[in-house]
Structure formats: structure tokens, C-alpha cells
Amino acid sequence: MFLTFLFVGFSSAQVGRVGINTVNPQNTLHVAGTFRTDSAKTVTSTKRFAVLDSNGVLQSLPSDSLKSIFANTNLSSFVFYASNETQANTSSSTMQNKVTLSLPAGTYMVWSYFEAFNVNTNAGVRGTLAQDGTEIAYGELWSDISTYSPWNAMREITSTATTTIALEWGSWPNGTTSYIRRARIVALRVQ
């Protein structure tokens, strides 16, 4: 048996506010410490994300605000991004470049993503992440016919000079038709 003791604070000055481990809640619910939830409301809009503001308040922001956040802060030497949102198709198993990102010397966590499907049964899509033409991540995506599924890979890379990261793709097996869209590469400089 586990017993949890919780100090819940109420104050007449904060009508309608509840504090956990605080007697001076600043919001409707103010938790002084960590919290956990076993269930949460499903967000029906895929165009929102959650962040903590400078006061520790959980905010829901539209995904388009990421562009303005990066544009209005000095993150350009730490965060690098390239994308190709257009749909393309191929029946070739030869790897094709979908999007590239050039990075200055340094150490990065690189994340890549695309959505794809193959119109044939028992067929799929291959994806690779390459650094200066050398494969650093590989994976196959076997999806339901005509249903886009996500593919992603993450790798840490280091380079002493400018390096090019490429997200490549192709059909598998050769002669089957694959579709791709929403290809992205994000690199976060860690050193």
C-alpha cells in the first residue's frame, strides 16, 4: 500500500485557484514540484504543441509559431532545418535525394522524417540518412496500401568541416510504386 501526502493550499486571495505544495497559487492549478497524469485529453488538432513559458506555465501554441520563435531568437547557429513538403513518386529502388541540409563544422543531433507508402502489396519504401554521401542510418517502411506512414531516424554526427546531410528514399522491391511527402531534416548543434 502506498500513501501519498499532499499539501493543498487555499487562500481567499486566490479564489478559484488550487496550489499543490504551495499556499500562493499563481494559476488555476499551480504544482510546486513534478506531476504525472495517467490520462489526458486527446488533442484533435495536429497543428499545436505544448511548451512551458518562462514562468513555468504550460501553454498550447500553434505549430506555425515555431517559425516566428526561430526567426525572432538567436538560434540560427544552433538549430538547422530543411524540408520538402511536396509529394513525389518513384518505381525505382535506386535511392533518390528528397531533401538536403548543409551544416558547418561541429557535433549535431540530426533527426529526419518523411511520410510514405507503396501502392503494391508486399512492398515498401526504403529510407536513408547520408552524411557527405555515406549512409549513416537506414530503414524500411512497410505500410498499408495508399496509407501514408511515418519514417524517421536520428543520429549524432560530428564533422570538422562543412558537411551535407541528405534524406534519400526509394521503392522496394524495384518496379513497385512508392509515394513520399513531408520530408524534413532538423539538426541541433550540441558542440
Image: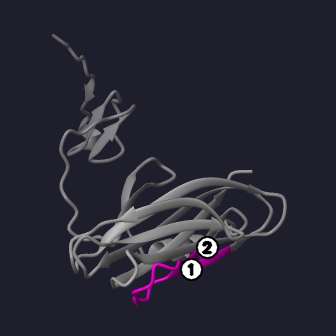
Q: What is the x, y in percent for residue 43?
A: 22, 63
Q: Is residue 84 magenta?
A: yes
* Contact between labelled residues 2 and 1, with CB atoms less than 8 Å apart: yes
Q: Position of residue 69 (x, y in %)?
A: 55, 70
Residue 55 highlighted magenta (yes or no): no
Q: Which mark is residue 14?
A: none
Looking at this view, is 158 or 174 the one in front? 174
How packed mark 1 is, by other alpha carbons closer than 10 Å (few <14, some 14-19, many 20 or more), is some
Q: Is residue 143 above or below residue 99?
A: above
- What number of labels is visible? 2
160 left or right, relative to 166: right
Cα separation, mark 1 vs mark 2, equals 6 Å
Q: Which residues are magenta?
A: 81-101
Q: Name the residue located 51 percent from the left edge and 66 percent from the top edge.
A: 112
> At which x and y percent is residue 58?
37, 52
Residue name at image x 20 percent, y 13 percent: 3
Q: Is residue 99 left or right of residue 141?
A: right
The residue identified by callout 2 is 166
Which circle marks residue 99 in the picture?
1
Q: Amino acid at mark 1?
A: Val
Position of 139 relative to 54 (above/below): below
**Camera-side residue of 101 and 21:** 101
